[in-house]
Amino acid sequence: MMAFLHFMIDAVLGLISMSVVVHGLLGLLASLEVINRNNAFLNDLRRLLEAVTAPFLRPIQRVVPPLGGYDVSPILLVLTIAGVRMYLLPAIFH
C-alpha cells in the first residue's frame, strides 16, 4: 500500500512539473510567433495548463516578484518539485 501511495504522489508531482514546462514552452512559442495564437486547439491546451498550474504558481508569485520583468515562479516550482521527488518522498516512504 505504501509503495502505491509513493507511486501516485510521485506521478502527480511529475505531471504537475511537466504541465509547468509545457505551459511555459507554449507561451514562449506563442510570443515568438512560432505557433499561431488563433489555433483553437493550442488555445484550449494553454487554458487547461493554466488551470492546472496556476494554483501551484500563485503562492510563489505572491512571495517572489518578477525579476527584471521575467516570472521565475515556474522555475522555482519545477526545482521544488524535483527536490521533493528526489529527497523528501524517498525519506518518507523508505
Image (spheres, rainbow, N blue to C red):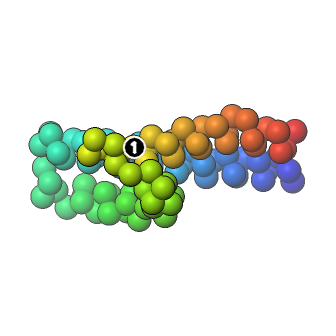
Is 33 placed left or right of 22 in the picture? left
Q: State the image quarter where residue 84 is shown.
A: top right
Is 92 placed left or right of 29 in the picture? right
The percent coordinates of residue 39 (x first, y second) are 16, 56
- Judge whether 76 appears above or below 65 on screen: above
Observer-nearest of 1 and 85: 85
Q: In which quarter of the image is the C terminus?
A: top right
Q: State the image quarter where residue 72 is shown.
A: top left
Q: Residue at x 45, y 40 (%)?
A: 75
What residue type is disc 1 on?
A: Val
Q: Which residue is drawn at 69% across and 51% down?
A: 9
Is 32 placed left or right of 75 in the picture? left
Q: Which residue is drawn at 32% across and 63% down?
A: 47
Using a 10 Å C-alpha cutoff, classify the residue at mark 1 as few (fewer than 14 neighbours), some (14 to 19) or many (20 or more): some
Q: Which residue is drawn at 67% across and 40% down?
A: 85
Observer-nearest of 59 and 63: 63
Residue 90 seen from this side: yes
Residue 57 seen from this side: no
Q: What element carries label 1?
A: loop
Observer-nearest of 55 and 69: 69
Which residue is denoted by mark 1 in the rendering?
72
- Number of numbered discs visible in the structure rendering: 1
> Quick one: which residue is furthest to the top in this view?
86
The percent coordinates of residue 73 (x first, y second) are 43, 48
The percent coordinates of residue 63 (x first, y second) are 48, 55
